[in-house]
Amino acid sequence: MSIKKRYVFTGIIAIFLFLIIWFISVALAYPPVPPNTNAQSLPREEVSKGFYRIGNNWFKKNEFGIYEMYVEGAPYDRGIINGKLSSELVKRQEDIFVGQITELVPNKTYRGFLKYLIGWFNRNLDENIPLEYKQEISGVSFSASGNYGAIGTPYQRLLNYHAAHDIGHALQDKNLVGCTSFAAWDAKSEDGGLVVGRNFDFYVGDEFAQDKIVAFIAPDSGFKFMMVTWGGMTGVLSGMNEKGLTVTINAAKSDPPLGSATPISLVAREILQYASTIDEANKIASQRKTFVSESILVGSANENKAAIIEKSPNKQGLFKSNQNYIVCSNHYQSEVYANDPLNIQNKKESSSLYRYERMNQLIGKYPKIGVTETAQILRDKNGLNDKELGYGNERAMNQLIAHHSVIFKPALRQVWVSSKPYVLGAYVAYDLNKIFQLKGLDKDTAIYEKSLVIPADPFISTQEFRNYESYKRLKQFLKKQISKESTVAEDSIVKIVKCNPESYEAHWIAGDCYKYLGKRDEASAMYKEALKKEIPTLIEKNKIEKLLSTLYEN
């Protein structure tokens, strides 16, 4: 993870903590009055090891390490059942969030500032969330950890986690994640039908991405749908409904919000549950006020095309491509934002425009794009004109940090979800038509389509990948050593560069280590080498240049 990403996720982990603490005094949220139901009394049956069932609802882990869950019914009921089925993961995800706080947010002054700011932001959060989703979150909260009662009730904590992405994104004044997505149709598609691909490059440590859930939801109102999520999360990041409408979200640049609004993941959830066309999706988005700026790529089987809803706290645009494909990174393309200062700044300073151009280049390599080609595009690790970027670079399609990657064939109601690690594991295929026709599930039933699985990327078996994993471990180790003012061995500095020789960040870290050791000449050489590499953002480039220019001061 780059220095920039470390700052971003330092911010969001701090937010996770103070979203919990300070609504106790300034932003209390009480769970909605529960309807009459016997869902709380329904026991979770363990059919076999790791396979649980409650009535028609079930939860299990497949051979690729992906958890699969089916939940049906009214909001409160499905929340309770969701929580019961995945209770271990609900608790584990919160443990991961909270466990990162001390390590990533050591500055007490920074935390002290955030606690007041977040409390103010979230003072009216529950007023901006539809009752249906508050009931569902309330149901899930019965399965939340009992270890954090001192910092908030389970409902308060889970409700605020749904806003953490939005506020963390805004407070950092940077993109929370550098996601990239695209869609192709008609003459550009292998069979003429719409194909959609996306990488969700959200990273809060490797542990966080270990337990992704592919959830199939059959609500009592609206459309049935699937989404890729994690324990306790009811909002949508990537998903498709039974009508063949797909939704994926990409962060854009925002001003800090002045108050709470609807979390973007819940706006995306509402679209997925209640829209069947692009216009219906756009109308739903327009009815909700959001914290921050976000692009929502919507694919529609009914129209056999995709469009991008571009939404900020104060306005909304809809971008439709005049070609038979569309690309979405982290900047806006509609006329509404053509002269928007934040959008112009974002294109200049971030990696978004670079990834946009690289995606166009990759799409141009293929006369026709099918599922296999989409996987190859999403797994691409190089830069423009196939330039080596160093592994883990934010300018790449595949940044080797993704929580998940998905491919949709909306007309066929088929979806492929990547298995760990990152985008390198096999893409596991699901057919929504078949899954939503299942009447219960036994322990021997595989719900994925074995014949459609896309094999793991061969890169996963290479020495280069093993070197990258070593690089990540070394990066964390060396940063800790410096922060704790501990010993830094020079052979570790040499090794981190050897493990990822084309990476600007490897040389940057090496420079910081040599500077820490008082070896200015060696540090200078590393900073200069870093500046020769592909640096994702202008902010990072300026930081390295400043380190170099001030190296011999004092």
Image: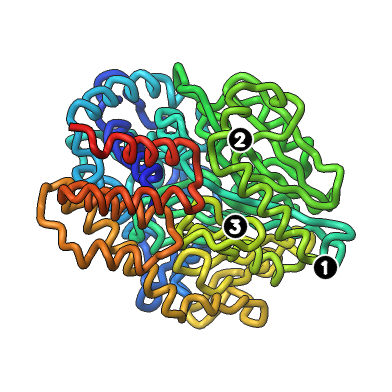
> At 63% from the left edge and 28% from the top edge, which residue is drawn?
344
Residue with the most extreme left position: 486
Q: Earlier in the sequence, mark 3 or mark 2?
A: 2
Residue 202 visible to the viewer: yes
- The kind of secondary structure element at disc 3 is loop
Q: Quadrant of residue 125?
A: top left
Residue 224 visible to the viewer: no
Tell us which disc is closer to us: 3 or 1: 3
Please state which amino acid type lies under the numbered disc 2: Lys
Q: Earlier in the sequence, mark 3 or mark 1?
A: 1
Q: Is residue 97 left or right of residue 172?
A: left
> At 57% from the left edge and 32% from the top edge, which residue is drawn?
346
Residue tagged 3: 383
Q: Quadrant of residue 159?
A: top left
Q: Which label is found at residue 417? A: none
Within-10-Å neighbours for mark 1: few <14, some 14–19, many 20+: some
Q: Is residue 183 left or right of residue 143?
A: right
Please state which amino acid type lies under the numbered disc 1: Glu
The span from disc 3 to disc 1 (Cα, nearest Å) is 25 Å
Residue tagged 1: 190
